[in-house]
Image (spheres, rainbow, N blue to C red):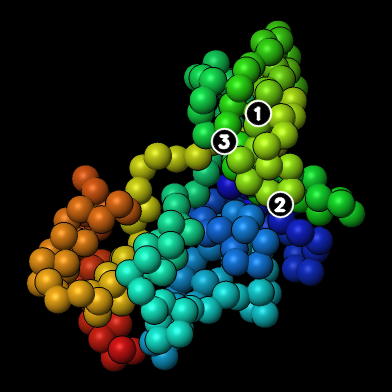
Amino acid sequence: MPNSQKRKATVAPAPRRRPPPRMEYRARSDEAWYGARVVVQDGWLRVMFENFPEDADEWYNPGADLASPGDVDALRARFRRACLALDDAHCGDLRPGDQLCLACDMHGGEIKYYDAVLEAVEKAPHGTVDGEERCACRFTARWTEGPRRGCSDKVGVEVVCCVQESPIQDPVLTEFLDHVRNRFGDGQEEATAASQQAAPSGEGEIAPVSSLTYSSSSLSSSF
Ligand SMILES: [Zn+2]
């Protein structure tokens, strides 16, 4: 997800070549998607938004906010791998039905990101600006979230991000969620093995052992 237009400038704009966030999070406050990272602090999960001040952080208290396995799964579903801005030269890769994340122009000029499904692509000849290909196609997408949910809009490449199917790999988040999840139910050992081998966020891609080990030891003091 692009960093550049995330709310009015209470902080300096991000440098243009800054690496994109690896993970994004659907905020509780507005259900929009934001680049984010997490830490565990005093046993709570702290979600910190890219390019936002500390007071925007969202916190999860395992005792109060995560009272059932369903709560844990719902929190897990708030995270995903960061979307990628649609590359002008690769607009032809999109197909109807693809899941997109679009910049939504809120009242007052604020931009937020919500998901939509691609319905159609209206092809147009691409131009070139400063030696770089520029897509001139128009994309019709139906919002599945946000204030325009259910509506279709025709948009340009500049507001289109592509939702990544691959799972996130964030050892801190995975460790925290698995730890909380394992407090429920009696098949604790099975649950631990299952969540590390086949959780929705980890299937087929296991985080490097060194990261898990590190995060495991760093977390143990917090719980
Ligand atoms: Zn195009």
Q: Of discs 1 and 2, which sits in the foreground?
A: 1
Q: CA distance from mark 3 to mark 2?
A: 14 Å
Count up the numbered dots. Answer: 3
Name the residue type under label 2.
Lys
Task: Give the label on residue 141, or none.
Answer: 1
Q: Are marks 3 and 2 in contact (CB under 8 Å)?
A: no
Name the residue type under label 3.
Leu
The residue depicted at 48 percent of the width and 59 percent of the height is: 78
Q: Quadrant of the C terminus?
A: bottom left
Give SS at disc 3: strand
Label located before the other in sequence (3 or 2): 3
96 sits left or right of 206 in the view: right
Which residue position is annotated with label 3?
A: 100
Which residue position is annotated with label 2?
A: 112
Q: Position of residue 191 (x, y in %)?
A: 16, 67
Frontmost residue, 29 versus 49: 29
The residue depicted at 59 percent of the width and 63 percent of the height is: 27
Give SS at disc 1: strand
Q: Residues within 10 Å of mark 1 (few under 14, many from 20)?
A: many
42 sits left or right of 94 in the view: left
Q: CA distance from mark 1 to mark 3?
A: 8 Å
The residue depicted at 43 percent of the width and 57 percent of the height is: 77
Label located before the other in sequence (1 or 3): 3
Frontmost residue, 133 versus 135: 135
Q: Does 52 sit above or below residue 17?
A: below
Label located before the other in sequence (1 or 2): 2
Q: CA distance from mark 1 to mark 2?
A: 16 Å
Q: Are marks 1 and 3 in contact (CB under 8 Å)?
A: yes
Q: Position of residue 175 (x, y in %)?
A: 29, 71
